[in-house]
Image: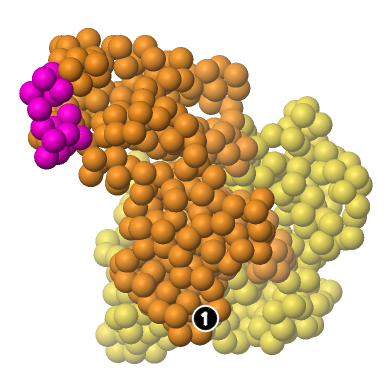
Amino acid sequence: MSQFLTKRILQMLVALLGVSIVVFALIHLVPGDPVRVALGTRFDQDLYDMLRERSGLDRPFIEQYFAWLGNALTGDLGLSFRNSQPVTSLVLERLPATITLAFAALFVAIVVALPAGIISAVRSGKPLDYAVSAASQVGISMPDFWAGVMYILLFALTLRWLPSSGYVSFLESPIEWLRHLVLPAITIGLISGSVITRFVRSAVLEALNQDYVRTARAKGLSEWRIIRRHVLPNAWIPIVTVVGLQLGFLMGGLVVVEVIFAWPGLGRLALTAVKDRDFTLLQGAVLYIAFMFLTINLIVDLIYVRLDPRVRVS
Amino acid sequence: MSDPILSVRDLRVRFGTKRGVAEVVNGISYDLHAGETLSIVGESGSGKSVSVLALMRLLAEPPAAIAGSVLLHGRDLLKASHRDMRSVRGKDLAMIFQDPMTSLNPVRTVGYQLSESMSLHLGLTADSARRRAIELLDMVGIPSPDVRIDEYPHQLSGGMRQRVMIAMGLSCDPDVLIADEPTTALDVTTQAQITDLVAELQQRIGMAVIWITHDLGVVAGIADRVIVMYGGRFMEEAGVNDLYAAPNHPYTDGLLGSLPMPGADRPEKLVTIPGLPPDPVAMPPGCPFAPRCVHSDASRCHIEVPVFEPDRARHLVACHYPLQVTA
């Protein structure tokens, strides 16, 4: 077990290293000189040269990368090129909002997807199955920018039940926190839930057609017990995979939804960094997103070990 | 003879398919008495497995449509509610399946799967179900059952898994154990062990067994009575020795001819039966075997379905031109 864990953590570090190289290289290949963008109309050759020297941009690419990597290993991602604040604190500042929205959306997604997917599989080929499939098709096809705007129009502007945008910290006011969270969480949660529903349906359907289900029926178990005790424990394995992937995406920030709902998450931070050519900030944000994604993958792998005895042994 | 435990009368199973109605079981009747082993033999697609799945009501209806009657202690299972059927399955009628690799749940321990029907049907507590599960594993010849009980199916060999399936089948002392080709997926030495095990356990416990197989060689060692099935109908029914000594049906004769028998005074070359089994969507009007039978004639065999002659009680044959008049 500890051997498995060590191996997976090493793999994760290698992946992070790869991500850091790609991100670093991409940003430096993209046209648009950050110093030029920062100076804008106040361009002055001496100032430009001085800024390039101070930020190390005049040094060779490889040297820049290793300098950055060395600092990153100590947790120092450098200063934002734009406003000179530490990148680490800028990213950490956005974490509470990002994590809150990610888990709230995932909660909505699971609450919708599990029952819908299970019912759809159990009633496969019947009207209820078609209804669920049609609904999830709509959910998947619906663009988030459109759905978000529709919810704002209906629930915020017409019915006036919920605020249209913004974020309130839980510590400040739990009720307002929840009220601000509902619409963005539903916007993403329903989309994500539609994807998960399809996976739940196919995983449950797949398990339902296995021979051991016939064995369970031959024992005289009720259909509901068979679903709970025999089908779902097998179906969890593919379901956990897709839920993990979805959570990975959600944790990386959701640019469009964050912009629509003025949500102070990582997506908007990354978007701003791109617009400003704030390459230090963008590197930090992307590295964090990759880190979250890989961590969630690691957790998913650990859950596999719990769920599947065949993985446990090998 | 005492009343039979199980009485199947005119059982018919059809499936709605895209190509039309498939007539898979076409009116079969038999009795099963306490402690008896009945073997139903037939090639793939003869309807043998479907016929037992139908009496367990384990076929999805639709697409399956089941008619006739299946009397268990005089009660018709085909008219029983789903709830009543659940109390019969695993308790009065137990079943073991062909492939022990896939018939056990990979994410549940042996003990969990064994205890399940005991707590359901016998109301045993977790502790006593576990104790009995260990006894059962010991009974079916699994070494160190107290360790094996906490293992998962993938940690056991195919033969071991089939032993676990048998232990599961026996856990609630069923009246009838239905074994649907339980040795087909196993290698030959393991096959013999499993067959012997079931025969031995049957002697000890006294349940009746329905043993479905396509292998006449397996039948010889275990069955009291054999029914030969073809095209969803019974062709011949006899005591195991009668059948082997004097097959009356041309199909049975063909099957026996295709069986290698060391030392027997049979021709060296194995016989094959030319042709293919009938298509269940387009069953021939007369005898289902007529198109492949060397003895068939156009005036009778292709028109009129032969049935068992009721007066020849010990050895029944459904053929217009049986091979031997006395058996």
| Image point (62%, 74%), residue name | B57
| Image point (59%, 30%), residue name | A312
Q: Quick one: which chain is yellow?
A: B
In the picture, residue B192 is in which quadrant?
Answer: top right
Question: Can residue B124 be seen at all in this image of the molecule?
Answer: yes
- Answer above or below: position of A68 versus A210: above
- Secondary structure predominantly adopted by residues drawn in magenta: helix
The x, y position of residue A20, in whole percent, is 31, 25
- Answer above or below: position of B243 versus B112: below
Task: Please tell me whether residue A78 belongs to the stretch shown in magenta.
Answer: no
Q: In which chain is the residue bearing label 1?
A: A
Between A195 and A172, the residue placed more toward the observer is A172
* Residue type at numbered disc 1: Arg
- Answer above or below: position of A288 versus A236: above
| A54 left or right, relative to A302 | left
Image quarter of the N terminus of chain A: top right
| Image point (47%, 43%), residue name | A94
**Which residue range is magenta in the image?**
A35-49
| Image point (27%, 64%), residue name | B275
Mark 1 is surrounded, within 10 Å at the Cα level, by few (under 14), some (14 to 19) or many (20 or more) other residues, namely few
Task: Please tell me whether residue A46 belongs to the stretch shown in magenta.
Answer: yes
Between B275 and A199, the residue placed more toward the observer is A199
Chain A: drawing colour: orange
